[in-house]
């Protein structure tokens, strides 16, 4: 699924990076669904600006998937629905936040991390509007943690496992579980930056992560197992699509 960016696409991505940098440097950096109004305005702006280049990159990537892998479009849509359902299953956690599976790691394993920035942001937007889960002012922060940071870790871990010749389903499970956990490490950092307390950012982050761990570690394990099961089902019913996106080799499809 590798393809070079056109001149116009490179220009669009550079523009998004420039806007992102402007947003970051124009707002003080004093700085899992963080709820509406829980972040200071400047933090909300910064996280939104940081997300912008990734969202543009994701749009470009999705455009190429639609153009070059028509058979996989339905599978891509399914990854968005999968993320919506899993991340809507929330459990109360740290004040101002919640614990839940993310569902974005599996999409990153199959399609790469870029498309998940867009799908994850759409999921978070609909949940904020329809379910009051998360918020509009915290959309940037939630998008960065759940739709950018987590998927990048899942994708990287999966590729590493494949190089180490780890079983494919085991690789998927480990990648999705660690992507879920990393999402909450980022969320803890975001909350600590916004509300460091008297002990400071580092101590606040450790405290947030400690509370998150009570619910998130079991949820991450469950998400890893569920993601492996979903891939096993896809290998039975959607082999042509998995071959189309390069997840399965030709030999694997013939089995």
Image (cartoon, rainbow, N blue to C red):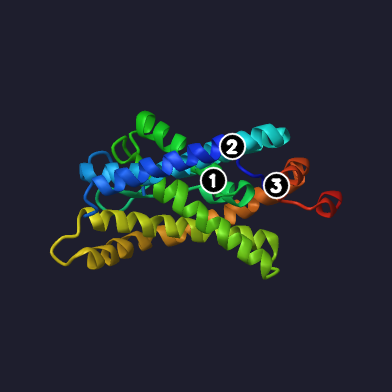
Secondary structure, mark 2, is helix
Q: Are marks 2 and 1 in contact (CB under 8 Å)?
A: yes
Quote the CA–CA distance across marks 2 and 1: 8 Å
**Front residue of 100 and 108:** 108
Q: Which SS class for mark 3?
A: helix
**In this rendering, would 138 be left or right of 236?**
left
Callouts 2 and 3 close, C-beta under 8 Å: no
Q: Quadrant of residue 162?
A: bottom right
Describe the element under mark 1 as helix, strand or loop: helix
Looking at marks 2 and 3 on the same chain, the residue that comes earlier in the sequence is marked by 2
Instruction: Kindly report the distance in space between the C-alpha atoms of the residues bearing marks 1 and 3.
Output: 24 Å
Label 2 vs 1, first from the N-terminus: 2
Say which residue label 2 marks: 62
Q: Residue at x 31, y 58 (%)?
A: 189
Q: Which mark's residue is nearer the viewer, 2 or 3?
A: 2
Q: Nearer the viewer, residue 255 or 53?
A: 53
Mark linked to residue 114 = 1
Q: Where residue 50 appears, x then y in whole percent? A: 37, 47
155 relative to 237, above or below: below
Crowding at mark 2 (Cα within 10 Å: few <14, some 14-19, many 20+) = many
């Amino acid at each position: 699924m590798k393809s070079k960016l056109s001149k116009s696409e490179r220009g669009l991505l550079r523009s998004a990076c420039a806007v992102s940098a402007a947003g970051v440097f124009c707002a003080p950096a004093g700085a899992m669904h963080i709820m509406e109004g829980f972040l200071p305005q400047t933090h909300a702006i910064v996280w939104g600006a940081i997300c912008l280049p990734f969202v543009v990159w994701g749009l470009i990537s999705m455009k190429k998937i639609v153009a070059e892998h028509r058979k996989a479009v339905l599978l891509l849509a399914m990854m968005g629905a999968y993320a919506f359902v899993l991340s809507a299953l929330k459990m109360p956690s740290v004040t101002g936040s919640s614990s839940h599976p993310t569902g974005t790691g599996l999409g990153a394993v199959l399609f790469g991390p870029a498309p998940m920035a867009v799908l994850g942001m759409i999921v978070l937007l609909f949940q904020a509007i329809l379910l009051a889960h998360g918020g509009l002012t915290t959309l940037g922060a939630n998008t960065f943690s759940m739709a950018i940071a987590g998927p990048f870790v899942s994708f990287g871990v999966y590729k590493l496992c494949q190089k180490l010749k780890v079983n494919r389903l085991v690789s998927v499970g480990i990648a999705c579980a660690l992507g879920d956990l990393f999402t909450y490490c980022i969320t803890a950092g975001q909350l600590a930056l916004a509300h460091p307390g008297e002990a400071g950012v580092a101590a606040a982050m450790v405290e947030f992560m400690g509370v998150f761990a009570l619910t998130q570690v079991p949820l991450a394990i469950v998400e890893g197992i569920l993601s492996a099961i979903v891939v096993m089902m896809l290998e039975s019913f959607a082999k042509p699509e998995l071959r189309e996106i390069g997840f399965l080799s030709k030999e694997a499809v013939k089995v």
